[in-house]
Image (cartoon, coloured by chain):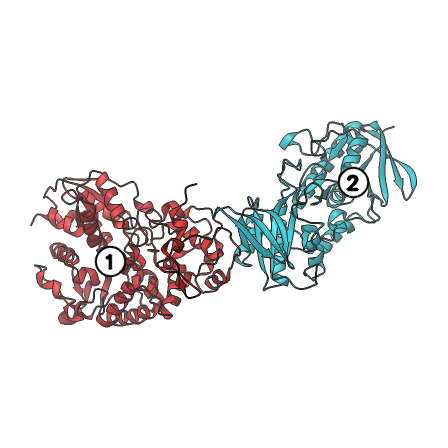
Amino acid sequence: MPVDKKQIIEKEKVVVDGIELTAEWNRMFEQRVVFDYDTTTLDKVTNVAEAESMGWCYQCGQCIPVCPVDNVGEYGPRKIFRNLQLGMDLFASDDLWQCTTCMNCLRVCPKEVNMIKIMPAIREQAVLEGNVPEELQKAFTNTFEYGNPLGESQKKRADWVQGAGVPVPIMKDIKRPVDVLWFVESYPAYHIRGKQASAALAKIFNKLGVDFGILGVEEKDTCDSQRLAGEMGLFEEFAEYNIKTLKKYKFRQLLVTDPHALNAFKKEYPKRGGEFDVIHYTTFLAPLLEKLNLTNSLNYKITFHDPCYLGRHNGEYEAPRKIINSLPGVELIEMGRCREQSYCCGGGGGGMWLDGFMSDHVSERLSENRVREAVKTGANVLAVCCPYEVSRFEDAVKSTGNEGKLMVKDIAELIVEAMGN
Amino acid sequence: MASDNILVIGGGPTGMEAARGIASLGYKVTLVEKRPRLGGTPDASQYAALTPDLRSAEEAIGEMVDAVTNKPNVNLMLDTTVVGSSGSVGNFKVKAIQSGKEITIDAGAVIVCTGFTHFDPGRETQKYGYYEHDDVITLVDAEKMLKAGNFVRPSNGEKPKRVCFIQCVGSRDRQIGNEYCSKVCCGISSKQAIEIRQVVPDCKVFIFYIDMRMYGYWENEIYWPAQEKYKVNYVKGIATEIVKKGDQLIVKGEDTTLRRPMEVPMDIVILAVGMEPSEGTKKVADIFGLKKNKYGFIETTGGPLNTVSTEVPGVFAAGASTGPSDLEDCVSSAGAAAMKAIASLRAAVPA
């Protein structure tokens, strides 16, 4: 009878009574018979505030086909419950770090088992116990020390402005109220491709005559992904700092590039006294496009990736599409998994800083899976509007051998191209 | 001569509700019960709390008893067993033995409410060792203990640390001859699981099931609280057999979603026994010439549109005499039977 390889346990070294066994004895089959249902950890998990719903799963399995991780690996919310029932210690399991908090499971879960609350709550315990994957810890440490997960100098947070080619007012220099305060966030401020998208957005603002300003070196990471990855302490500290800093200035609207920042400002900062009228840049720009007089025909077939934290988490599906459809010479081809059903790029919930860790658990990266889907549509541009995605998808285009077939462009970059100057 | 009396046979919830309904509409009713008291199986088997609302069975059944005791139009005959019948719609002569004496009851129509009996887990197979192991009990045994507020291992009187339910015992089984689902056991097991967690909070409770059949509101009123609030563990796959190891029971089955055998120790195993027709149901069916289905329940004629008429004009059947029923079914069909019996009486006895 064929044996599933996963049922074979192979130890490098097996020592019994002080004698090391020869290699052939190092292979053993997994224990077949279930001798106990040790629900100690299940009870421990469901006793953690916000993680109660982990115990509500009735194994319908609807989460499995929509879980982006289970599409390329073996992790899935239903399985977490089942494994807990069978005695798994989630606090020490690799399963704890695989969820990207994309919310696709919650969308379909009839029992409302809420991984968006469960994962941060349990991860927080693991973080307090110092039980965190190394590369994620590095991102936490970077954020703590430098104010951003990339580990770049806080002093250089506004350096991208130099290359923007247009004026980008900085609040502490201009010393006046602005209409729109643009919270740039870390990746758009530091990452090479993020900076290009930021420069594009600055150009659009200048063309539209938007009265805007940025915090510059006063800005720190919103830490929403760090929170979802379990670093609650860090999040609290940074939230307090950002709220205090923003409150120094007068502005009508808070604009964000990053959907993760949008999520923080919409759902988490208000609980801590930071109530701002926050808007994503695509939502802001969609009604203003006519004013830009876009005339440069792009001749692109574009497919669009819905960011989890813009779409499922915060309900914006139309604005990015409205912008893309307004670009001259462009055809929008939807991927099968779009809007509410969109696939995750793998970057959320700490996934941005767990690619090495995840490589042991998945057959391909989530971003690679998504890029293959994008290529299949026949599109030559993958449009994005979340700063995690440009780098993730550009890497995936290379690793899947699709270089030259698919370009990854931020929606702001596409608008600037259509502006034609 | 036509009779304006309706005979209700069986003093359980169905019979009591039928009698109450008939009397409240101003018609005469004779309610016969072979036991010396009313209440039927919930009383005889000492049910603790009703499903799904966990209301005290004693209190709820007590209310039903009061509604038919010393009431105008209700002729209550306890300790009375029906033994024969002649005549037809409008004019039945029903023979009964009341406290050892034979009597005749005149009735224009008859409602059979003779109910069910709990499946005897030792009847066909002994794979769960009900008569072998003290700590293997049924829902009925557990209900008695829960009513007494003392849920312990029968073998040693100690509080259990691990209890499991095995679903579908005596139901959905071709070998046993009961292919039907007994309808209420999933709910009752879940209800008892909640009660056990209330009485013995540090006891782990497992329910091994094939499908959880929590129809309608039982889903959210029993199943979900059992899992979400009382942390009852539901595991798909019922046990095959029970073996004893030391003083513990080893429940052997398949963990079906894991696709592996399981052998887990338990202190008490509760068999979720289903429903079979009571002896009374089978006898009364024969007395009135009512058709029985292959399981011995009385066959009604109207499918889903008429759940109480039988092939014999003027004779109706309600509640668990017609098949597995919960209390809601019993009370609802009792009302339907009362209405139809009155209608048949009015047709036979023109006003």
Residue A62 appears anywhere in the view? yes
Callout 2 environment at 10 Å: few (<14), some (14 to 19), or many (20+)? few
Q: Quadrant of residue B83?
A: top right
- The residue type indicated by label 1 comes to Asp
Placement of B168 over or under A136, stated as above or below: above
> Is there a contact, CB below 8 Å, between mark 1 and mark 2?
no
Q: Looking at this view, is B189 or B68 the one in front?
A: B189
Name the residue rendered at 20%, 53% in the picture.
Answer: A390
> In the image, residue A41 lies at what x, y percent?
47, 62
The image's mark for residue B26 is 2
Q: Where the N terminus of chain A falls, by quadrant?
A: top left
Q: Quadrant of residue A404?
A: top left
B67 left or right, relative to A185: right
The residue labelled by disc 1 is A258
Kindly indicate which chain is depicted in red in the rendered structure. A
Q: Looking at this view, is B88 or B139 the one in front?
A: B139
Q: Which chain letter goes with mark 1?
A: A
> In the image, residue B334 lies at what x, y percent?
71, 40
Placement of B238 over or under B109, stated as above or below: below
- The residue type indicated by label 2 comes to Gly
> Closer to us: mark 1 or mark 2?
1
Q: Secondary structure at mark 1?
A: loop
Q: CA distance from mark 1 to mark 2?
A: 75 Å
Q: Secondary structure at mark 2?
A: loop
Q: Quadrant of residue A183?
A: bottom left
User: What colour is chain B?
Assistant: cyan
Callout 1 environment at 10 Å: few (<14), some (14 to 19), or many (20+)? many
